[in-house]
């Protein structure tokens, strides 16, 4: 169902009041956890074991959960619990949350909004944070964007992070949660503690980006594009009409605008031979190479050498670089940091500082998109709705 020009203003303003979506986020899944301490951030917290209510812990108490044999053992000042499979902690106050500490790690204590599910799996603990969408968005913006930025930048990052989450909320469905807390989805370390980010999230509450057919877009972003973003199909297989290459003059003097990597000629030629079968006289186009713009292949010669493979193999900051060979030394001088598709964070930061609105900045990086309230989507489109899930990220 296509959006007509007459419907656009109405859709932007129209908002259906409904229950806020709750996302299940798999947290700290890259760690092997066998012992944790969970505390209420505010007020009391109800504790369930294998679906049965066991009691409460107060704000001055904590619940220590350990893997003991083939079960979970949990103890607080007033509780002693054994669960075969699952322990769930649910704060009684919506504005509360849970403080979490890993007892076998030096990782700093984290506070998570929403509730926490502790599952026993493979002799270790799996953690899932059931978190309201807006609180999750604020936590992601804090982790992905950092501090001390312009309010307009935090607004645009809020819209893109919220859109990305809802567009990809089935990414880990087979594992029992929607998104993870790492770069595979979006980085998320729990509750946002910056007022400026919270205000930006509130100011853009529920706003997401959709394409002309009212489908949530893949709101990809990266650190620095080096002066030019990429088409989606130049890096991956699928073309997206809103992820088009665009010139970006705003990021060229930013901290991640330039990089350099030096290799010996022997290392470089051995790599090209081993990985792509380039040897002998065929090496010439790959020893000195200067792209006029973003390319897909190194040297644009046969055999084809995909720049994305070089970036992955050599762990380079980007695919946008020159190659200069002098004697026995090969220098790769690059621009940008990240995959280069979608929103350039450092470019967007600069545009915000120069007074551009978050809406204009989003339209600079994502073409042919509309910003709408997420609660209107099910009303205007004829497809499976994004569910309100009850208690994934360059």
Image (spheres, rainbow, N blue to C red):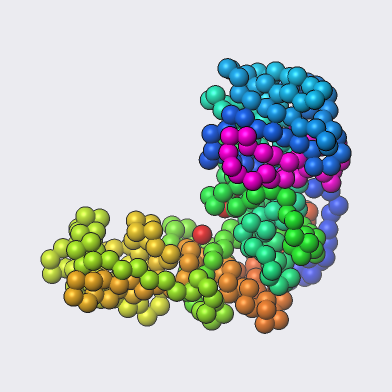
Q: Position of residue 338 (x, y in %)?
A: 48, 64
Q: Is residue 86 left or right of residue 114?
A: left
Residue at 13% of width from left, 69% of height from top? Answer: 281
Residue at 65% of width from left, 22% of height from top? Answer: 72
Compared with 382, 119 (above or below) is: above
Compared with 388, 329 (above or below) is: below
* Front in this rendered view, residue 118 or 341: 118
Q: Quadrant of residue 105?
A: top right
Is 104 one of the magenta-colored residues? yes
Can you see residue 244? no
Q: Quadrant of the N terminus?
A: bottom right
Can you see residue 15? yes
Residue at 69% of width from left, 39% of height from top? Answer: 100
What's drawn in magenta, residue-wise?
Answer: 89-113
Compared with 361, 190 (above or below) is: above
Residue at 43% of width from left, 57% of height from top? Answer: 237
Q: Quadrant of residue 65?
A: top right
Q: Is residue 379 left or right of residue 274?
A: right
Is 73 one of the magenta-colored residues? no
């Amino acid at each position: 169902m296509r959006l007509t020009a007459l419907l656009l203003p109405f859709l932007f303003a129209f908002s259906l009041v409904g229950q806020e979506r709750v996302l299940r986020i798999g947290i700290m899944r890259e760690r092997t956890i066998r012992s944790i301490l969970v505390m209420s951030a505010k007020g009391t917290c109800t504790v369930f074991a294998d679906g049965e209510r066991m009691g409460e812990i107060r704000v001055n108490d904590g619940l220590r959960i350990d893997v003991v044999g083939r079960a979970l053992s949990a103890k607080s000042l007033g509780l002693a619990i054994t669960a075969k499979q699952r322990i769930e902690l649910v704060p009684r106050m919506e504005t509360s949350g849970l403080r979490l500490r890993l007892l076998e790690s030096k990782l700093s204590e984290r506070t998570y909004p929403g509730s926490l599910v502790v599952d026993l799996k493979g002799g270790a603990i799996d953690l899932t944070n059931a978190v309201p969408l807006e609180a999750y968005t604020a936590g992601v913006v804090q982790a992905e964007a950092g501090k001390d930025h312009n309010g307009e930048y935090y607004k645009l990052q809020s819209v893109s992070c919220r859109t990305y989450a809802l567009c990809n909320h089935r990414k880990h469905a087979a594992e029992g949660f929607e998104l993870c807390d790492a770069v595979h989805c979006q980085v998320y370390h729990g509750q946002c503690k910056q007022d400026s980010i919270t205000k930006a999230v509130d100011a853009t509450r529920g706003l997401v980006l959709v394409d002309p057919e009212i489908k949530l877009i893949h709101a990809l972003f990266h650190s620095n594009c080096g002066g030019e973003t990429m088409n989606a199909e130049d890096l991956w297989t699928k073309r997206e009409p809103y992820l088009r290459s665009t010139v970006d003059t705003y990021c060229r003097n930013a901290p991640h605008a330039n990089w350099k990597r030096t290799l010996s000629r022997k290392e470089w030629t051995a790599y090209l031979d081993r990985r792509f079968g380039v040897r002998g006289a065929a090496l010439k186009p790959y020893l000195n190479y200067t792209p006029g713009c973003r390319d897909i292949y190194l040297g644009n010669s046969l055999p084809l050498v995909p720049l994305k493979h070089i970036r992955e193999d050599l762990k380079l900051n980007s695919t946008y670089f020159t190659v200069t060979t002098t004697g026995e030394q090969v220098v790769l001088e690059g621009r940008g940091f990240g995959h280069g598709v979608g929103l350039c964070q450092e470019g967007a930061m600069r545009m915000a500082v120069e007074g551009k609105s978050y809406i204009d900045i989003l339209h600079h990086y994502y073409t042919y998109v509309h910003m709408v309230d997420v609660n209107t989507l099910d009303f205007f489109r004829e497809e499976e709705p994004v569910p309100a899930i009850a208690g994934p990220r360059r």
